[in-house]
Image: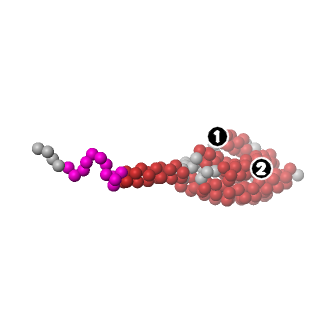
């Protein structure tokens, strides 16, 4: 006995159209997901920025407790406050991109902090102003300038552009502090 079927082995125009639409939409979805994912440069920028920021905060907290110089303490207070705000924004941005960033300094910066922690008095103040104030902010300005031009993710690029003027201001403050301590 033969069973009758309503469909033939040749695809109907309707099933071909549905298949093409599904394939097209799948391709669009995959492309939009790939476009939304930050690239390697963006991830590296966020990681380096988090490391630099946590180092600034840790060193400035050290300066708050170790320095007896009012100008150094004032600079350190500003750095703790402002870098903590930027670190919070960075963590929120990284989290929204499913990128994990550390809130602790990396190994190289930990060694720098250990060295700084062994210094006292004027030697501490001068080293803090030179290495954390000036040198670290020069590095941060370069990092954020590069990211403002090279980041592929628009949110990460906007974060770099928005943060850069404050870092440049910190560098100006650090240069003035370093010059004052050299007198």
Looking at the image, which residue sits at the far left?
A: 1
Between 177 and 146, the one nearer to me in the picture = 146
Locate residue 172 relative to residue 51 in the image: left or right.
right
Between 137 and 69, the one nearer to me in the picture = 137
Locate residue 124 relative to residue 15 in the image: left or right.
right
Q: Which residue is mark 1?
A: 107
Q: Residue at x 70, y 56 (%)?
A: 164
Tell me which corner region of the image, top left, top right, bottom left or bottom right, holds residue 159.
bottom right
Q: Residue at x 60, y 56 (%)?
A: 155
Tell me, for residue 121, which label it has, or none: none
Question: Range of the magenta residues?
Answer: 5-16
Q: Residue at x 67, y 59 (%)?
A: 162
Circle 1 Cα neighbour tier, 10 Å, few/some/many (<14 / 14–19 / ≥20) = few
Locate residue 91 relative to residue 83 in the image: left or right.
left
The relative height of residue 85 versus residue 23 in the rendered view (above or below) is below
Q: Main secondary structure of the magenta part?
A: loop
Q: Earlier in the sequence, mark 2 or mark 1?
A: 1
The location of residue 31, given as percent across then percent down, is 50, 50
The location of residue 99, given as percent across then percent down, is 55, 49
The location of residue 49, given as percent across then percent down, is 65, 49
Tell me, for residue 134, which label it has, or none: 2
* Picture quarter with the N terminus: top left
> In the rendered image, is residue 94 in sight?
yes
CA–CA distance in space, label 2 to label 1: 20 Å
Q: Residue at x 67, y 43 (%)?
A: 109
How did the renderer colour the structure? secondary structure
> In the rendered image, is residue 68 in sight?
no
Circle 2 Cα neighbour tier, 10 Å, few/some/many (<14 / 14–19 / ≥20) = many
Between 58 and 25, the one nearer to me in the picture = 25
């Amino acid at each position: 006995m033969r069973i009758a079927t309503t469909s033939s082995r040749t695809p109907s125009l309707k099933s071909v159209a549905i298949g093409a639409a599904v394939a097209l939409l799948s391709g669009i979805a995959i492309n939009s997901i790939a476009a939304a994912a930050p690239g390697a440069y963006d991830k590296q920028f966020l990681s380096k920025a988090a490391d630099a920021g946590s180092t600034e905060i840790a060193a400035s907290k050290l300066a708050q407790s170790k320095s007896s110089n009012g100008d150094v303490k004032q600079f350190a207070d500003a750095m703790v406050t402002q870098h903590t705000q930027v670190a919070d924004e960075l963590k929120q941005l990284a989290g929204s991109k499913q990128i994990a960033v550390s809130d602790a300094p990396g190994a190289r910066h930990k060694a720098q902090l250990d060295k700084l922690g062994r210094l006292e008095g004027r030697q501490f103040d001068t080293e803090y102003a030179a290495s954390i104030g000036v040198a670290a902010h020069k590095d941060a300005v370069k990092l954020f300038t590069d990211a403002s031009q090279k980041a592929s993710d628009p949110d990460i690029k906007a974060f770099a552009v928005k943060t850069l003027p404050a870092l440049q201001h910190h560098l100006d403050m650090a240069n003035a502090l370093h010059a004052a301590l050299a007198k």
